[in-house]
Image: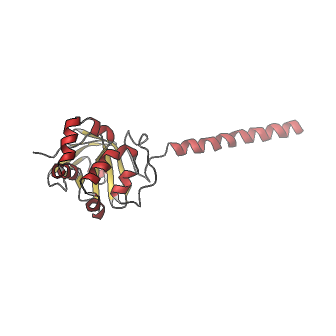
Amino acid sequence: MRTAKATEAALVAIPLALGGLASPSHAQDAPPSPSGTFGPGCSALSQKANTARDKVVEAAAAYPQLSQLVSATVRAKLGVTLDGKPDVTIFAPNDQAFQKVTVSQVGALLSNQGQLKKVLTYHVVDKQITPNELSKGSFTTVEGSKLTTSGSGTDFKVNGKANIVCGNIKAANATIYVIDSVLQPPS
């Protein structure tokens, strides 16, 4: 009788233990932002904290993969401008996007604050763009030129070139779409 009860207890304990192990594993697979994020790069996008209550520059700074963008934004003195806007969308080039640009191009850009602002504000739209608007979108940027979005499901491009690797990340005043290329405004 004791053996039967011990066996029964073990059979109950094993699934409970496995269930307990599954929960932390599942938590590690959670998306990097509150809800509604999408894209193949979301699982690789690590963040330091929940960004939904942070203004856009602080929210971007929470993602180590956006460090070069944040650094360029600070250098261009755009932080207060972007954080002061009530609803914006940022098409945020990740650090890999900056690696695609030659060292001399980055150097020239960083040494010319006017051109740096022009390039960075070309990545910003003065309204929050939902994923539903990305299929065939055309948006005027803060820089003043148009950019386009295309795609479907969770596969979207900006200007037919930059892939959205993780989209719909929420900040207090912005929606962030991480892209894999630095966009250049039309000449």
Across and down, in percent, residue 83 comes to: 31, 61
Camera-side residue of 174 and 58: 58
Q: Is residue 128 visible?
A: no
Query: Which corner quadrant holds the C terminus?
Result: top left
Q: Is residue 121 visible?
A: yes
Query: Which corner quadrant holds the N terminus?
Result: top right
Across and down, in percent, residue 181 comes to: 26, 40
Across and down, in percent, residue 114 comes to: 16, 52
Camera-side residue of 35 and 92: 92
Instruction: Identify the residue at image location x=25%, y=59%.
Output: 127
Instruction: Identify the residue at image location x=21%, y=41%.
Output: 107
Across and down, in percent, residue 128 comes to: 29, 58
In the image as oriented, which residue stretches furthest toward the right?
1
Instruction: Identify the residue at image location x=45%, y=50%.
Output: 48
Left or right for 7, reference 129: right
Instruction: Identify the residue at image location x=35%, y=46%.
Output: 67
Q: Is residue 147 above or below residue 163?
A: below
Please state the total of marks drawn on the protein image: 0
Camera-side residue of 80 and 8: 80
